[in-house]
Image (cartoon, rainbow, N blue to C red):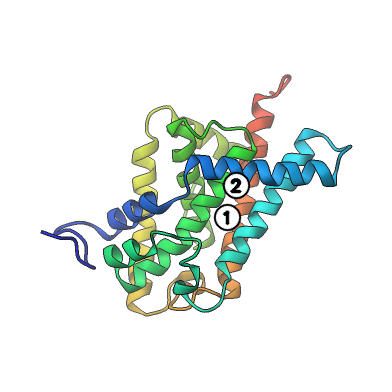
Amino acid sequence: MSKTATGAPGEDPDSRLLKAIEAISISPSDAKAMARKYMERARRKYPKSSNDAHMEAAANGIVARYCRLASTSGGVTALTGVIPGLGTIVAALGGGLTDAAVCMKLQVDMCLCLAAVYEWDLDNEDARHLAFLIAAGGTLEKAGAEAATQIGSKAGVALLRQYLKGAALQAVKEFFKRIGIIFTRKALERALPFGVGVVIGTSTNYALTKYVGGVAIRWFILDREEDSPGAA
């Protein structure tokens, strides 16, 4: 039986959302190339700065790029040039959840590029799981979902590190289950959270992506500090 807009029989919306994003998220090689590009730009612009400063400048540039993509006007179809698999997402998810998937795809891509900037090995599955965890966790925070731990904090670093020791995939699925519930409910109202609707190019999409990017940068900086010599 072929997959339709409602997905496979009995498949939960959160499962379809996660699978769709996994299918079209940026490749490790492209994420690494993006990170190199922004690091080289930072080194040229600030030749006397430290490597940490170059990382932060590159990270801010990447976040700015994805904020612009998220706020692109003209609707979801305007993004077909940067999302080659968009047609697949539309077929798998249908209208409302397609909007959610596009936004989540951009945030996951952004977090993968940031992971490369902060020298995570993108060929290791942990880096991919981490990108999904930070993107989803930041999205839930922005949505006002209750959370015991903020991702961009020392406690958040400890939490995600713990997930990466063995429960990362389950944590990703749980985060996306919560996101799927939020987006599905809002899709029925034709007004998804953060202004994610038929037209993706809004200031609220920009704000969401900037928020998630800020959370990600804080997480990676704290993670490096935890590993630095003399860290408590």
Query: Residue at position x 34%, y 55% from top?
Result: 20
Residue behind mark 1: 212
- Give residue 54's quadrant in the image: top right
Q: Does the CB distance between marks 2 and 1 fall below 8 Å?
A: yes
Q: Mark 1 belongs to which amino acid? A: Val
How crowded is the residue under tag 1: few (<14 C-alpha within 10 Å), some, or many (20+)? many
Q: Mark 2 belongs to which amino acid? A: Ala
Image spot of residue 29 (x, y percent): 52, 40
Image spot of residue 74 (x, y percent): 52, 79
Residue 151 seen from this side = no
Residue 160 seen from this side = yes
SS class, disc 2: helix
Does residue 206 sit above or below 17 in this rendering? Answer: below
How crowded is the residue under tag 2: few (<14 C-alpha within 10 Å), some, or many (20+)? many
- Give residue 184's quadrant in the image: bottom left
Direction left: furthest residue: 1
- Which sits in the foreground, 93 or 164? 93
Query: Residue at position x 82%, y 34% from top?
Result: 50
Numbered marks: total: 2
SS class, disc 1: helix
- Which sits in the foreground, 23 or 156? 23
Residue behind mark 2: 216
- In-image side of 37 versus 82 (left or right): right
- Give residue 33's quadrant in the image: top right
In the rendered image, the quadrant that contains the C terminus is top right
Direction right: furthest residue: 48
